[in-house]
Image (cartoon, helix red, strand yellow):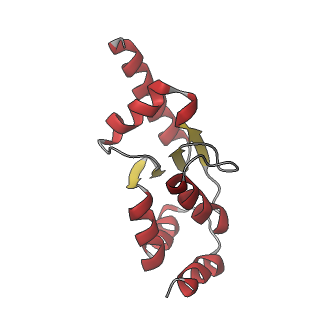
Amino acid sequence: MKDTDMTDAQSRIKETVTANPVVLYMKGTKTMPQCGFSSRVAGILNFMGVEYTDVNVLADDEIRQGIKDFSDWPTIPQLYVKGEFVGGCDIITEMTLSGELDQLFANSGVSFDQEKADQIRAANK
């Protein structure tokens, strides 16, 4: 792979995460996830009513590797809020159950359904 391909992937990733308030790099799409971890994070966001951009890493090998290099995080899915890397499946799950994800969305001006977030926590006690 040429270095220019990776540079191009990095610039496309940077553009995507800065142009969209919430971005999920995942295997598959928000309506048809292709792995359990991507499905879990997409499910949390979908259930909470969060508007987000989904990027299917399976459709682009440069992005699939590029996102790992961009975040210095080895796994997918990866959630970005306001251009900042938040975490992967385990971190997002923990943040959802602790209420930290709600706080992050609220502090970032990202709308979500608080009642649905509370339902997730109630169902997982």
Q: Does 112 sit above or below residue 20?
A: below
107 with respect to 117 (left or right):
left
Residue 10: % across, % down: 40, 28
- Label count reads 0
**Residue 104 spot, x, y in % from top left:** 45, 66
Q: Residue at x 52, y 69 (%)?
A: 106
User: In the rendering, at what x and y percent does residue 38 appear?
Assistant: 53, 52
For image coordinates 50% across by 56% down, the residue present is 37
What residue occupies the far right of the structure in this picture?
Answer: 31
Front residue (pair 102, 27): 27
Image quarter where the N terminus lies is top left
| Residue 64 percent across, percent down from the top left | 45, 33
Q: Residue at x 65, y 55 (%)?
A: 51
Report the residue at 68% width, 48% height from top: 32
> Where 63 sits versus 102, above or below?
above
The answer to whether residue 33 is left or right of residue 83 is: right
Q: Quadrant of residue 86?
A: bottom left
In the shown orientation, is residue 109 left or right of residue 87?
Answer: right
